[in-house]
Every structure is written in C-alpha cells, then in structure tokens.
Image (tube, rainbow, N blue to C red):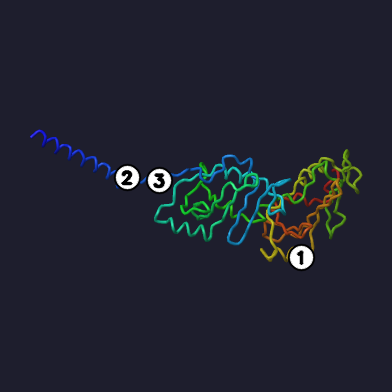
Amino acid sequence: MQKRENIRLLIILIALIAATVAVKTVGGPRRVSFDPKLFSISDTSQINKVAITGPNFANILSKEKGPWMVNGKYPLDEGLRRTLLPVLKEIRIRRPVPDSRREEISAFLRDEGIKVEIFKDGALAKSFLSGGVKEEGLTWFMETSGAQPYVVHLPGYESYVAGLFEITENDWRDRIVLSAPRQTFRRLTLNYPEGTAQSFSILFDGLSIGMPGINDPDTARILNYLNLSEYLLADKYLDHGEYPVYDSIAAGNPYATLAVEKTTGRRDSVVFFPKQENNPFIAGKLEDGQIVLFEYDRIKGLFAKREDFEKSR
C-alpha cells in the first residue's frame, strides 16, 4: 500500500511540475535574446567614412587627408558631424519587431529603407538598413544581410532617429558661405548697385582699420559690423528648380553684394536680392551660382550704409 501511495504522489508531483512549466511557457512573456548595442559603434574616433544610400540618392561623408567632406565636393557641417558620431555610438535596440510584422517591416526596409555603411580606417565596420514612421517618431534598423528588424532609439531622447540618414546633400553642407576673421582679410565691401553713395569698404592692413570716404569713422561701429560679418551662415542651400520662385528672384537685379578680399588673394562674395514682402527669407547667390536663403531678421544688420559709420555730431 505504501509503495502504491508513493507512486501516486510521484505522479502528482510530475503533473504539477509539468503544469508549472506550461504556464510559464504559454502564459508568460516570451523572452528574446538580442544585443542592444548591435548597431552601435563603441569607438567612433576611427570612423573615416559613412556612406548613406537611399532609393534615389547617395551621400558619402568622408575624411581623407583634410576635413570631412560631403560627396567629395563640400565641407561637412560641423554641427551635423558632432550629431552623427554620437548617434552611431549611443543608438540602442529597444525591442525586436514582433513576429506579426516582421516580414512586412523587413520588406519595407529592403525596398524603401536607407542603407548605412560605416567605415573605420577604410574597412567596413557596420552595415544596416534604416527606416521608420516620422509621425510616430518610430525608427527601425535591420542588418543589411539580416531578416530581423528592430525598433531602435537614443536613450533619453524621443526622436525620429532615421531622419538623420534622410538628410539631403545640401543639408549636410557647411553653412558658412563667407568668412572674414580680422586677420584674414584686406578689404570687406558692401556695394549697393542703385545707391553707390551708400556703399562702403572696410580696410585692414594687419594693424589698423580704415574706411575710405570717411576721415574719422566710428571705430566701435566698424568693429560691431566686422563681428556681424565675420562668419556668414546660410539657412538653406537650394537646388535649381527646387523652388522656382527663388530661381526667378536670383535672375533679377541684386539688392547688394558683400565681398571679402583675403590676405591670400582669394575673393569671396554673396549677392543679395531684394526681400519679398511677407517672406522671412532673403535670397542670395554665391560665386559658383549656388542659390542660398538667409533669415532676413538674422542678417539685416549687414545692410548698413556708409553714413552709419560716421561719428555722431
């Protein structure tokens, strides 16, 4: 009898263990193992190229012998460089895309996603596909050769990370379009085509500053103007045809031209066109024909007149 009772208790114990395992397996959350740092680069100091390829564009950000460049043509905006590298270091996986949407999101990333390739010392270190839903601030990454997409994020920030890789060539560019630090220029000129009497030049010989046409100019006002014009930043570069209205404006008569003659002999200039009513931007054109936009209220101090530098009587 005791032996039979022991067997019965053993059977009950086995059944209870089986039931407990079943509850944990079926009723509890399914644990998925993944590396939250799968897409991150722990040491970004050796990164010298990031290739970003979308369905209809390709941008290569690279550093070879000189500064970082965009597609080998334009200096890279320093602010964006300082954003990109920390993102590549700090990006983390939040969770895998659930099985119910895995094939859908995988197909989307393969067909419409942006391929990001990161090179360290010329060798490919990481490659993945990026995409998401901007309105929801949702970003997906997937290894280029993989099939499992993940929801990724920057810890501490709720932002659309994929948007960084959707930036156009023009928006990657350094926005400094004209620079005139004190020790680098000989002459800075603002010329008004329709009012030459109000045009002016500021001369610097390495020691003193002068203004032709004014015997005793207000030095403080000149220095304030030089501080304002030391680094002229554009708000946006435009492709021809991107906004036809600005193509038309830039084909018209200029309002003013700001030019800098450097000690090296180089000359840089920006041609400004009349501000349009109810438009917060003013159009400009660089020497290579590139059309740029400036927020008028930010740079309106540039449009001084010669009489502004005369000492008050």
Q: Position of residue 171 (x, y in %)?
A: 65, 54
Viewer-side label of 1, 2 = 2
Q: Which image quarter holds the N terminus?
A: top left
Nearest the camera: 242 or 229? 242
Of mark 1 and mark 3, the one earlier in the sequence is 3
Viewer-side label of 3, 2 = 3
Nearest the camera: 282 or 238? 238
Q: Position of residue 45 (x, y in %)?
A: 63, 40
Residue 237 in the figure: left or right of residue 98:
right
User: Which residue bears the numbered disc 1?
Assistant: 251
Say which residue appears at 32% left-offset and 45% top-offset.
28
Nearest the camera: 176 or 34? 34
User: Which residue bears the numbered disc 3?
Assistant: 32
Residue 309 in the figure: left or right of residue 93:
right
The answer to the question of whether label 3 and label 2 lie on touching residues, with beta carbons closer than 8 A, is no
Q: CA distance from mark 1 to mark 2?
A: 68 Å
Q: Position of residue 118 (x, y in %)?
A: 60, 48
User: Which residue bears the numbered disc 2?
Assistant: 28
Q: How many marks?
A: 3
Label number found at residue 295: none
Q: CA distance from mark 3 to mark 2?
A: 13 Å
Q: Position of residue 149 (x, y in %)?
A: 47, 52
Indicate the amino acid at tag 2.
Gly
Q: CA distance from mark 1 to mark 3?
A: 60 Å
Name the element at disc 3.
Answer: loop
Viewer-side label of 1, 3 = 3
Of mark 1 and mark 2, the one earlier in the sequence is 2
Indicate the amino acid at tag 3.
Val
